[in-house]
Structures are given as C-alpha cells and as structure tokens.
Amino acid sequence: MISQILSHTPVYVWALLAFLLYRGYLASQDRELTLQKLAIIPVVMVVLSITSINSHGVLGEAVWAVWVAGVAVAAALVWVLSKGEIAVNRAAGTVLQRGSWAPLMLMIAIFITKYTVGVLSVIHPELVHSLTGSLVVTTLYGLFNGVFIGRLVRYAAAWLRQPAAVAAL
C-alpha cells in the first residue's frame, strides 16, 4: 500500500521535498541574509498551507478564522519566548540568522501534514472532511505558519529598530 502511494507521488512533490531539505540545511548554519531572502521560506510555507486549506469543506469560510488564530497564537509565542538578540547590519542590508534546525523540522512537518492529508483524502476522505479533521489540519497549518511568520516579524522588527545606515560623503 505505501509503495503504491509513493510510486504515484508526482515528481514535483519530491522536488519540493528536496528544495525544503536544502533550505532547511542552509537554515541550520549561521549566515547573513537580506530580509527578502529571509522571507522566502515563510512565504513558500504559507502558500503550501493556504493551497491545502478547504474553504468549501465542513468549516466553510470559518476555516480562515481557525488558520489565522493558529498563526496568531504561534507568532505571539515566538515573539514572547524568543530571547536571542538579532544582529542587523543596515549598511550591508543584512541580518544575521543564527543557525537552527527548527526551520527544517517545521518545513518537514508542513510537508508531511500536506502529504498525509492528500493521501488520507484518497484513502479515507471522511476523516479529512470531518469537523475534527478539518479543525486539526487547519490549526496545524496555522501554528506552523505562525512560527515562520513570528520569526520573520522578529527579524523585521530588529531591522526597523536599528538606525538607518548613513551614506558616506
């Protein structure tokens, strides 16, 4: 059964997994990035989640409120619980991202959740389309995305707190 599922998985899914593993590995090491580059993974993860949310399901349009609530809770927790200073270099236009395996774990969690929902919607559609299933999946997507968004907001806030670089005369 599992080999059938894996053999019917489109190539782009495996390419996406390879991309996420690569980006997760990069995030595990200290590096200087622009805010735009820092935003790539949060944007990709939000898009992956949003494309998986079903507003025509049992929750209807309330699915967005559930997702936003999950985002808000996780982003607030990241804001409150994160203690590390963020080094900003306005002259170079970069921030120092401390290496962490957390982004990789989150990316894999979103990938596995999305993949599992896809498989379950074929094998046991009643689970995915039930009220409980919809709430759990949507909340998970919101929480995962909230961590990424919360981290990005922390970096942006550190950037904004730092005095602007003065041009040399």
Image (cartoon, rainbow, N blue to C red):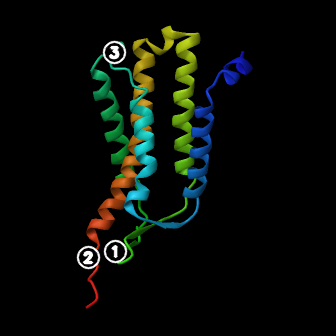
Residue occupied by mark 2: 163
Asked whether residue 80 is in view, the answer is no
Type of the residue with mark 1: Arg
Image coords of residue 33 (percent x, y): 45, 65
Question: Which residue corresponds to the image point at 58% horizontal and 57% vertical from the top-left?
Answer: 26
Marks 2/1 in contact by CB < 8 Å: the verdict is yes
Mark 1–mark 3 Cα distance, whole angstroms, equals 45 Å
Residue at 39 percent across and 35 percent down: it is: 142
Which quadrant would the N terminus be assigned to in this image?
A: top right
Q: Give the residue at mark 1.
A: 90
Secondary structure found at label 3: loop
- Mark 1 and mark 3 lie on one chain; the one further toward the N terminus is 3
Q: Earlier in the sequence, mark 2 or mark 1?
A: 1
In this view, 126 is above or below 111: above
Taking 156 as reference, is 3 left or right?
right
Residue 78 in view, yes or no: yes
Secondary element at tag 1: loop
Q: Which residue is mark 3?
A: 56
Left or right: where 90 falls relative to 113:
left
How packed is label 1: few (under 14 Cα within 10 Å), some, or many (20 or more)? some
Residue at 49% in and 8% down: 126
